[in-house]
Amino acid sequence: MRRRSLALLTLAALPLAGCGGTTHLAAAHPTGAPLVATSASPTDDPTPATSPSPAATPEPVVTVAPTPATVAMTPAAAVARVPVQAPAVKAPAAAPAAPVYSGGAASSYTLNYASNGAVVRWNPCRTITYKVNLGLAPAGALATTQQAVANVAAAAGLTMTYTGTTNEIPSKSSAPTSADIVIGWAARGSTSALPAGGSEAGEGGWFSSGVSNDGTHWTWQIVGGFVALDTGQMNLFSPGFGGGTRLGTLLEHETMHALGLGHTEDRADIMYPIISSSSPGVFAAGDRAGLAKVGAAAGCI
């Protein structure tokens, strides 16, 4: 399994951390069964303007990508799951090694690619479920989270369904088990997504899985995601949505990491790695173009 995570910082000019990387491992498979490889990829997260990025090859449910109907699925025990963590990037201009910038302000977005050159993304023809851990969340966090996810889903043309609360803590070391994506607040150092000593306000990432019938040609897709927010920095964010250091913007940013997008270099973008008092807080052309590349417009997988 490949994991990738990215972190975002907010400060009067705090940079978001971002990293990426992927590892493909094929497990032993019985004759006639497809090879199945899984990997995890961390995403980047923002930190308040006065103050997450797990990068295993954003930003945790482990499931195996569906196999063609005519081919039997490899037993779960045979699946190789190797997370790869990349160091956090804390310079606004720095970009993860794996992502590729599209270039141009009007299309300023960062995609991540599998070894076969395909964009790493969810299958847009399936429903993506998510749960929220509100144990350490600020007041009103659930409504803000649901609106943020709805905003991102609408822009991408994806169906993302809230299926309730959970006690599961978002992690970049293992995929979530209670839903496709787990969103939650945690204390710094209590989860691999928010390591001790870090300064990111949040971190988002995904886990992808690959299926092959011959060991050479692979079909990859994201099968799990996470969004972890540092509860100790929530006082730096204003509630709701709009310009400035808003909780809604932070949640949109991390959720977009969980869908496979990376940081951009355009300050107008939600995916810019810094949230500050001057952040516009609305989807820019680059954000929408990137979401189209990982959303319904890209077609079923």
Image: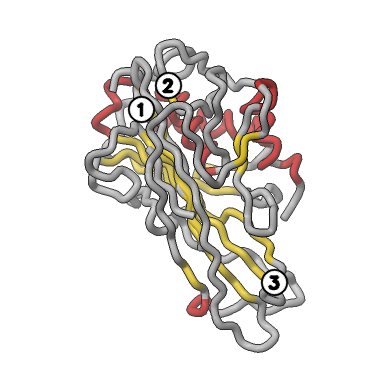
Among the two numbered marks 2 and 3 on one chain, the one whose residue lies closer to the N terminus: 3
Residue occupying image coordinates x 46% and y 28%: 273
Residue occupying image coordinates x 27% and y 28%: 233
Q: Amino acid at mark 3?
A: Thr
Residue 136 placement (x, y as % from top left): 27, 37
**Mark 3 falls on what kind of element?**
loop
Residue 89 placement (x, y as % from top left): 40, 37
**Mark 1 falls on what kind of element?**
loop
Image height check: is 264 above or below 58? Answer: above
Of residue 30 and residue 103, the one placed in the foreground of this image is 103
Residue pointed to by mark 1: 47
Q: Amino acid at mark 1?
A: Thr
Res. 122 visible in picture? yes
Residue occupying image coordinates x 41% and y 29%: 91
Image height check: is 275 above or below 52? Answer: above
Image color mode: secondary structure
Counting every numbered tag in the picture gives: 3
Q: Amino acid at mark 2?
A: Ile
Residue 60 placement (x, y as % from top left): 44, 54
Residue pointed to by mark 3: 216
Q: Are marks 1 and 2 in contact (CB under 8 Å)?
A: yes
**Mark 2 falls on what kind of element?**
strand
Q: Residues within 10 Å of mark 3 (few under 14, many from 20)?
A: few
Among the two numbered marks 1 and 3 on one chain, the one whose residue lies closer to the N terminus: 1
Image height check: is 139 above or below 101? Answer: above
Distance between mark 1 and mark 2 Cα atoms: 7 Å
Residue pointed to by mark 2: 275
Q: Residues within 10 Å of mark 2 (few under 14, many from 20)?
A: many
